[in-house]
Image (cartoon, coloured by chain):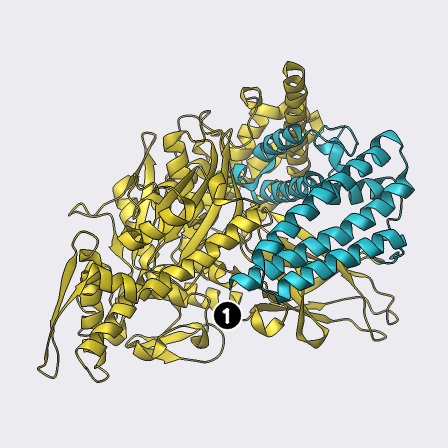
Amino acid sequence: MALLHIAEPGQSTEPHKHRLAVGIDLGTTNSLVATVRNGIAVCLVDEAGRAMVPSIVRYHPDGTIEVGRSAAAAHATDPRNTIMSVKRFMGRGLNDVAHVESMPYDFVDAGGMLRLRTVQGVKTPVEISAEILRVLAARAEASLGGELTGAVITVPAYFDDAQRQATKDAAKLAGLNVLRLLNEPTAAAVAYGLDNASEGVYAVYDLGGGTFDLSILKLSRGIFEVLATNGDAALGGDDFDHRLFCWVLDKAKIAPPTSEDARRLLMKAREAKELLTASEEAPIKAGLATGEQVNLSVTRDEFAQMTQHLIQKTVAPMRKVLRDAGLAPEDIKGVVMVGGATRMPHIQRAVAEFFGQEPLTNLDPDKVVALGAAIQANVLAGNRKEEDDWLLLDVIPLSLGLETMGGLTEKVVPRNSTLPIARAQEFTTFKDGQTAMAFHVVQGERELVSDCRSLARFELRGIPPMAAGAARIRVTFQVDADGLLSVSAREMSSGVAASVLVKPTYGLTDDEITGMLREGVDRASDDMHARAVREQQVEADRVIEATTHALEQDGDLLNADERAGIDAAIAELRRLVSGDDPRAIKKGIDALSRVTDEFAARRMDKSIRTALAGQKVDEIQV
Amino acid sequence: MSIDLQQDFFALFGLPRRFRLDEAALEMAYHDLQGRVHPDRFAHLPDSDKRRSMQWATQVNEGFRTLRKPLPRAIYLLELAGVDAGLHTNTAMSSGFLMEQMEWREAVEEARSAGESEELTQLHTRLRQHAREVFDELAQQFDEQQDYVAAAETVRRLMFMEKLQHEIDDALEALET
């Protein structure tokens, strides 16, 4: 590996300039923000020294929005406007969500992603999540004393495209530059692996508040390679609380409780669950609106028994993920436990039994994901140092497919493919002069389209009119390193690119996002124009800095004319940056980007050739 | 001189174009290349760099996926040699092979309907062992005899066997749930 330290493309552009970047764990129950300070990843805390922000958002009638611990206080008195566990709603329709009947919210089901009616109007889960992200970003900027270059936001590995897109949209609404969506178990592996300099195959068992992930990673020579992932995007600690809550209703013979009482009892159930980690028995006491008193006690064994079926739901994914990776339990060198829910003793027991070894719990299961994300954010922002010569190779968790005749799915991208990945397929027209075509993209493993998740309908337009069957339309499905799908299409005989119109099934359209952004700016009585200028200036500075650095390193790849062209484009952009026309600055950025395109290609080639040269030397040494 | 994004995968990884392959060398070359082209190395750079990085990383992944496992590697070698493997059209097989396939299939079907997961696992192991022998044969055809027509038929046989292997996997999975 030492051979590769020549002209690394991702290394810090200016050694002394540290860019502020954070990792954010946007959790179902709690969220955290972390950063790398003096080479060490740390969680950023509030004035009371607490790292965790409860993922709770309360909308007040006067237009203020409260997030976190103070909002939590109102969970029982103002449940309709106090939204908890919003992560469960991301990229989901009302029919997808379990236990809606016992939730105190005023759901709006208008098809697509569900929405909630609050005292401040109808809100999407994306907007609600953005409020949590805003609070975390503000904490980071206050603590770090400057504007953030970007953030890595973690998502459950088993999140589908719609849930990932919703998370990215929320970050955009919160004004964050998303460097990468990172899978939670992978983030944990980074924090863990770099800490322990481990090599070998590891399993990460990640049971959070509302999601379950299981990833198998191979760690070797600084590469974290995800071999397979599995899970359940709707299983977590919340379900254990809910089971105990139902047990309480049953034991205390309580008729359907009011939403306030339901919230109260759910909280008591959660407290009891947490107590059972350390004690054999926990009390559940509460006074209800009817004047009734609940006075119960639950033992660890009773709790283990009533939640056994939930534990079982994590065992099937463990088997599947090993089969997908082509491994047996004894091939696993260590099992890392992540997520607060893995504190439950009967979960640790079940995992130990399955893998035949005690799981590793030496890192705080609540913080490890945020810490890993911070380490990744630091490197992605351009603060990469020589010792950061490690790389993550992650996979797509669920297969992508196309709907074909008869409601069947044709797999296009198989699950567990390493990202980024692209697959192209050719189609033809079936009518003379046909200029449009539609595709329905789904995600999942089942054969019937109705058993998979509908992601989006893509409409191709602008196909040149030809006789039926004469057009050859090559459709490319590209999944990027965030696990997000994009579709492009080209008619091959004419070379004409078709325009692609996306209609997400459970997502927001670009127009909706733009509308929300504008609304957000209005609310903060900010100047939209000033914001746009500022954004373009930051981007322009970034591009100039990166280009200047590239010229210093690889200027010899250019002839004098090419060099002059780039220098002129830089000078022009510098001139534009001092002005206040965001569109002009954008044009200047695009112009510079165009003249450096060929240069970037040559630099990439040079880098690859160096890699190949390095291998040959390696071969000789062996 | 520019490196072609469309160059063949063996050249991409600096490996000789053969069926037998040094897996460790492939993996090392794969990791080294991804270390240079992966989008994580370009997240702080302009969009044009990011775009190129994604194209390259996609291509490197595709190359690794193609070469890593023997069956896709064999299919790719046939493609490079311009030999039509007839994977979807040519289903003509020697009667001996077809008989053997039928016997395997019957054994799998029997174990499946009887719910014998132990038997299925054993069949799986035996089939894998058999596939290994056929792959040795294939290696001879590619690397020593350079007989691509014979190799194409062996590839078709191996595809039958792989399909059967998947059926056993599915049956095992169905028994578990």
Residue at x 62%, y 24% (from the top left corner): A555
**Residue A277 in the image, given as x and y percentages of width and height:** 21, 53
State which quadrant residue B102 falls in: bottom right
Q: What element carries label 1?
A: loop
Which residue is label 1 attached to?
A: A506
Task: Decide which of B52, B99 is in the foreground and name it.
Answer: B99
State which quadrant residue A155 falls in: bottom left
In the picture, measured across the screen, residue A197 lies left or right of residue A365, that is right
**Residue A427 in the image, given as x and y percentages of width and height:** 78, 64
Position of the C terminus of chain A by quadrant: top right
At label 1, which amino acid type do we have?
A: Tyr
**Residue A158 in the image, given as x and y percentages of width and height:** 48, 56
In the rendered image of this protein, does residue A349 appear above or below residue A552? below
Task: Decide which of A350, A131 is in the foreground and name it.
Answer: A350
Tell me which chain the residue with mark 1 is part of: A
Total labels: the figure holds 1
Kindly indicate which chain is depicted in cyan in the rendered structure.
B
Chain A visual colour: yellow
In the picture, measured across the screen, residue A34 lies left or right of residue B28, that is left
Residue at x 63%, y 21% (from the top left corner): A614
Residue at x 53%, y 54% (from the top left corner): A397
In the picture, measured across the screen, residue B143 lies left or right of residue B34, that is right
Question: Is residue A19 visible in the rendered structure shown here?
Answer: no
Position of the N terminus of chain A by quadrant: top right
Badge 1: few (under 14), some or many (20 or more) residues near its Cα, within 10 Å? many
